[in-house]
Image (cartoon, helix red, strand yellow):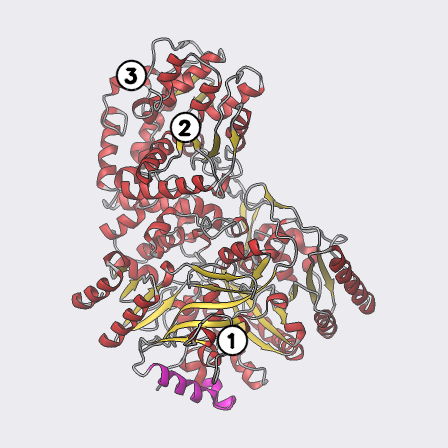
Amino acid sequence: MLKKQILEEFQKTVGPENIDDGEVMTNAYAYNWCMELVNCMEEKEPIPFSPIPKAIILPSNVEEVQQIVKLCNKYDIQFKAQSTGLGPWNQPSSENCIILDLRRMNKIVKIDDKNLYAVVEPYVSGAQLQAETMKYDLTVHMPGAGPQVSPLASATSMNGPGFTSPHTGHSARNVLGVEWVLPDGEILRLGSTGLKNNPDWFSGDGPGPSLRGIMRGWAGAKSGIGVFTKVAFKLFPYPCSTKFKLKGISPNYEFDIPDFMKLYVMDCKNYNYLKKVFLAVEREEISFICSHLSGYGLGAIFSNSIESLMDKIPIASTHAPLVIVIAARTRREFEYKQKVMNKIMAEFKLENIIGTKYTPNSLFYAEALRSNLGLHGFIATGGFQSSKGQCDTATVCLNTTKMSIPLKKKYIKKGVIANDFGEGVWITSYESGHYFHVESPTLFDQTNEKSVNGMAENMNENYQFDLIKHLGAPFFVEGDRMHDKFGPHMMNYHKWLRKIKEAFDPNGIADSGFYISAK
Amino acid sequence: MDEEEYQKMIKRCLRCSICKWIPQVQIKSQKYATACPAIDLYNFHPYSGGGKIILALALEMGRIKPSEELRDIVYKCTECGNCAIACKFLNTLEPLEIIMRLREKLVEAGCGPMPKQKAYTEAVKNVNNPYSEPHENRMDWLPNDIKIDPNAKLLYYIGCTSSYRRKEMAIAAARIMNAAGVAFRILQDEEYCCGSPILRTGEIHTFQEFLNKNVDIIESKGIETVVFSCAGCYDTFKVDYPLYRDYNFKVCHTVEFFNELLEAGELKLTKEIPITATYHDPCHLGRNAERYEQWDGEEVKLIPLISINIPPKPKRTGKAGIYDPPRNILKKIPGLKFIEMERIREYAYCCGAGAGVKSAFPEMALNTAKIRIEEAEDTGADVIVSACPFCSTNLQDGISESGSKLKYYDISELLLMSLGLEPEKLKQALAEVA
């Protein structure tokens, strides 16, 4: 709870109905997915609750956010900002912290269909934005977490791969202008939106050095470096016709598959071959989706329950499958893309198992277009986290995958994580195969202490493994403990990150549980 | 949902917020993307379906105690079930059932329901209706010229709201049945509250008393079919009663019944109704009107940590809701142009009146209705139609409050108008005309 005087000052800022420091509200906000895992890794009780925030506050605009942050500085209270709020990164790391739930900041400020960007506030969901951009024949990058989450959070503060990444890139590369409330309460406008004359959102870099790297680096600061109140990011041509017609009742919808859309699933048999095919496809710049999934993952994206996964065994038993979706706006474009695919399949002596071994429900295509496939990772136990995640060349990503299998098998044998034969990974490419993203979704039971402990141990050992084998920094290197572990092996980047934190947050007011502290 | 299942489920919310939205693939605009009136109006996460699952867990873990703070959040929910539809697109949680169970627990702890809901529960106990109206006035709605057949095997169960507050619906339904020559009876002074308002606020013991009383009476009269014009009574009889007790009669809603009469040519629509109308799916008639299917399978451990249900456990996803009959009726009315809202069928937005909200939190009910009215207006329709007396009252309140030019009709009123009955008979059935 907040002291009465402090509570009143916050109330004056947002109105009494938009702040709550009661036992019920603050406890509810202490819960999040995978929090038991984070607690376990921090050697705390493996419960799905973080430290209880002092209060929850719902600002409605940048001025209110600024005022809240200034009050936090005045009273030495930390803040944690969240938008759609999925995952432990949204949680406070101490009890001297309030949560800024940015839910009331939910406007699409602008869709510039000529210059291909949109400006949004934190609580616009990916699906909402996409629904509006589709009216202009455009689409948006959405993270693998699903269309219900905030694209602003992904673009400014998180790692942001997604199933449509070959077409829509990585969120770090899509950021343009940004409105940012710094931890000391100053408002910083990045790029062209900070210009004195005719400010606009079309560029993330203005005259002088770029601050985009400072703002989010690779994996984002998870609110540890301030609050992002508006962001502009790139829009992309919708890959096919935007006519979107569903029939039936959830979840068994039937979808009118657009004329120029086709799914390929090819069994590449082994990782070396997979790499070659992956690169060959991506070099041609034809795919809307191009992902490698494990057999389990492949079955899961075509299933809406664990039971329906069972009849996908013929495709789930493929080795090193590659999933490709091509889509086009004209027949000619579609024919061209199909010809390219045919040529690649002929060259590598591969077959498309779609239409022969397996034909998915039409809903798959709707989910592919609306970026809903990532959520299928949850159909088995509910407990799910990626035990590693990297971004690098195809070679490094596939080496990571291969080398990690024995380690994963060790924990499968212990019975603490679910059996995916150690192969449970998702790999997607960006920017025509220039770089790739790999993560290792791992199923555990979040209600079973043994499983949670085992999963935590698995993650820690994976991190150690990445260090020993020089496999790069996993994207869950967060918080002082992890940065201090990885920094010395990586040109002491953590020292520079601390300097950034110190410069931008001299009073240590932005909660750094998932970023880095200045000390 | 039994206690074991409840305890299992409350530990598994992903906090993904899917429950706040209609199914993602159905989102057509930013404006009408949301599913839950409570989180839309009160913004703090615990007002959402997932948020209430977290509250249930926090309560079980002793992190929070039954309190007014907790009660107010848990009861600011219309139990519309839209969260459950969204969640079950991929997951297996039952947010609606968890909320209902959580309310039962608050009642058991002496912390629920809300004071106004307690008052109407007492009224149900004392005078058999939640409006505290004298039981002997229950049949006051009935015009003298309605033909009732005391020996009919078909029962028209009017319900408290149509009997006392939305008499036009009862009159219209009865006149339509007369027009089609359908022999029906009513229970007269033996009709009691179906128990829905008390069930949905967690008072399950009182609910069971009324359930038993109603089933005993209906079965004792050899009734074969019960027709309801109230979506709430219909849902309660159809879906909730069988969870406690089997019965030997069929149930149907007037939209199903009238649609069948139209299909069979036993109702002739002759009069043009030149309006553009949109249809609001009542939650009780739509997604929630799906019976629980008996599942006698078992949970089998497939591999460590992964279990499957053999055979698969049926998910209630709104698939058995009554969606097409009302639309078929509207499309058959001469001169009527039918147009859909964005949120329809299993993911229709709630009117805001359900589960005791109208009495305990009238402002919430009204503000929800205004959202729905705006959605109806955005279609370009000049009339919003529905098939539930709660929706009727609340949507009409929303129209008045928002100053909307939209008109509200119950579907039976439009049907009656289109039958071309004499104006005097119509007047009795049309509150607005009268």
Residue under disc 3 on the same chain as residue under disc 1: no
Q: Are marks 3 and 1 in contact (CB under 8 Å)?
A: no
| Residue A25 falls in image quadrant | bottom left
Q: Foreground residue, A242 or B34?
A: A242
Between the C-alphas of marks 3 and 1, the distance is: 70 Å
Front of the two marks 3 and 2: 2
Magenta span of residues = A485-505
**Residue A78 part of the magenta-drawn span:** no
Neighbours of disc 2 within 10 Å: few (<14), some (14-19), many (20+): many
| Left or right of residue A387, residue B34 in this image | left
Which residue carries the number 2 mark? B409
Q: Is residue A139 above or below residue B187?
A: below
Query: Which chain does the residue under circle 3 lie in?
Result: B
Residue at 27% across / 43% down in the picture? Answer: B108
For mark 3, give the secondary structure. Answer: loop
For mark 1, give the secondary structure. Answer: loop
Residue at 53% across / 46% down in the picture? Answer: B298
For mark 2, give the secondary structure. Answer: strand
Tell me which label, 3 or 2, sits earlier in the chain: 3
Neighbours of disc 3 within 10 Å: few (<14), some (14-19), many (20+): few
Between the C-alphas of marks 2 and 1, the distance is: 57 Å
Neighbours of disc 1 within 10 Å: few (<14), some (14-19), many (20+): some
What's under tag 1, amino acid-wise? Phe
| Left or right of residue A201, residue A472 in this image | right
Which residue carries the number 1 mark? A475
Query: Which chain does the residue under circle 2 lie in?
Result: B
Which residue carries the number 3 mark? B140
Total label count?
3
Majority SS type along the magenta span: helix
